[in-house]
Amino acid sequence: MDMFDEHAPWQLAASQVKVFMVDPDFIIYGDEAMLSRMIADLKRRNIDLAVEMGMLYGDLKCGKMEGYLDPTAPGTLVNRLKKLGGELNHVVIDEPLFFGQRGA
């Protein structure tokens, strides 16, 4: 997580970054200190936070592949971010048409 240090050697690149995307599992299950450090540094650099996640959910017969999610995941993710002072600015939808069609 050195990239979120104030003196990390990506100053020029960071100045061009508008959005930083992480896996939702990092926000839900990741180390709280690491997540807090990332949130603080992204805020300092004025970089928006994004996650990629499925937007479909199925029952026990389908929906166990990419594009699907646990229906409690978005709320859990947003609540953890809020608790740590973060804000989710963007959600990237994970292949809902391809996997939604195949999983139906």
Image (cartoon, rainbow, N blue to C red):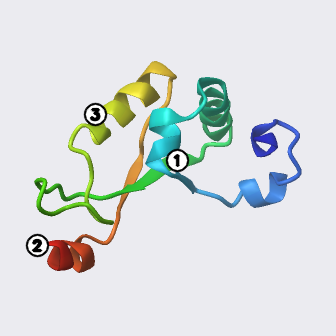
Judged from this view, the residue extending furthest toward the front is: 61
- Extreme residue in the top direction: 83
Residues at discs 2 and 3 in contact (Cβ within 8 Å): no
How crowded pointer 2 is (Cα within 10 Å; few <14, some 14-19, many 20+) is rated as few
Secondary structure at badge 3 equals: helix
Q: Residue at x 65, y 24 (%)?
A: 33
Task: Label 2, secondary structure: give it.
Answer: loop
Amino acid under disc 2: Ala
Which mark, by number, is residue 75?
3
Distance of label 3 from label 1 (alpha carbons): 19 Å
Q: Position of residue 28 (x, y in %)?
A: 44, 35
Q: Position of residue 11 (x, y in %)?
A: 82, 51
* Real-space CA distance between mark 2 and mark 3, rounded to the nearest whole angstrom: 25 Å
Q: Height in image: 99 above or below 46?
A: below
- Mark 1 crowdedness (10 Å alpha carbons): few <14, some 14-19, many ≥20: some
Q: Position of residue 56 (x, y in %)?
A: 19, 59
Query: Above or below — where is 89 with respect to 17?
Result: above
Residue 32 % position (x, y): 59, 25
Residue for point 30% across, 40% down: 73
Of residues 58 and 82, the one nearer the viewer is 58
Q: Which residue is mark 2?
A: 104
Amino acid bearing label 3 = Gly
Tell me, for residue 24, which label it has, or none: none
Dot 1 corresponds to which residue? 48
The answer to which quarter of the image holds residue 64 is bottom left
The Cα atoms of the two marked residues, 1 and 2, are separated by: 34 Å
